[in-house]
């Protein structure tokens, strides 16, 4: 796992630091999104020393270069998530249990068509996160 993150950081020309590796390991260990405070608490448990502001900064840097996904949650708190899949896809975010699932549906074709038709423009990129309740939460 550590080597995989090492390679990932190097591929993006990012410095490999113990803190960054710890953050990635923590987020990759669970299929849910975490707050910076929760990442920080887990780091302390693994005895990786870092102040909360450092954790915030590293999470921001890793999401700015696309390694981490920032979850924009209706509760307006900040969350981060690590997805190992690097093909273009979207995420289904459970607002009850925080689980994130890959959604391999992308409406880009129809969005692009609509933008060309109504706005006479062309789409370069797009972001989409879908919120809801997962199968388990609906059953519970
Ligand atoms: Zn759920
Ligand atoms: Zn994903
Ligand atoms: Zn898409």
Image: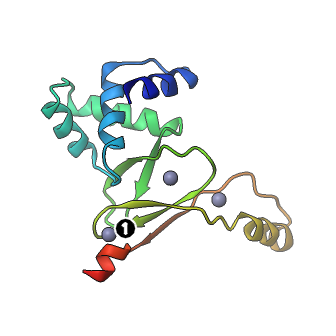
51 w.r.t. 115: above or below = above
* Mark 1 burial class by Cα count in 10 Å: few <14, some 14-19, many 20+: many
Q: In which quarter of the image is residue 18?
A: top left
- Image side of residue 24 versus residue 64, left or right: left
Residues 31 and 120: in front is 31
Direction from residue 74 to residue 87 in the image, left or right: right
Determine if the C-beta at disc 1 is less than 8 A from ligand 1.
yes
Q: In percent of the image, x 34 and y 51: which residue is there?
A: 79
Residue 7's x, y, as percent?
Answer: 50, 23
Mark 1 secondary-structure assignment: strand
Q: How many marks?
A: 1
> Residue 86 falls in which quadrant of the image?
top right
Quadrant of the snapshot with the C terminus: bottom left
109 to 19, vertically: above or below: below
Q: Name the residue under label 1.
A: 94
- From the top left corner, tell me how far across and down residue 121 is, in percent: 83, 61
139 and 81: which is toward the camera: 139
In the picture, the quarter occupied by the N terminus is top left
Q: Which of 80 and 2 is in front in this view?
A: 2
Residue depicted at 53% across the width and 40% down the height: 66
For image coordinates 15% across by 31% down, the residue present is 44
The residue lying at 45 percent from left, 34 percent from top is 62
């Amino acid at each position: 796992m550590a080597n995989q993150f090492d390679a990932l950081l190097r591929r993006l020309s990012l410095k490999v630091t113990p803190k960054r590796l710890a953050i990635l390991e923590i987020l990759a260990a669970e299929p849910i999104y975490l707050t910076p405070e929760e990442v920080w608490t887990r780091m302390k448990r693994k005895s990786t020393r870092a102040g909360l502001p450092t954790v915030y900064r590293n999470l921001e840097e890793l999401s700015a270069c696309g390694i981490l996904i920032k979850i924009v949650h209706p509760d307006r708190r900040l969350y981060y998530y690590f997805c190992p899949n690097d093909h273009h896809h979207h995420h289904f975010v459970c607002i009850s249990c925080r689980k994130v699932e890959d959604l391999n549906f992308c409406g880009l074709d129809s969005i692009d068509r609509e933008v060309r038709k109504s706005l006479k423009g062309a789409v370069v990129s797009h972001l989409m996160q879908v919120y809801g309740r997962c199968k388990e939460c609906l059953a519970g």
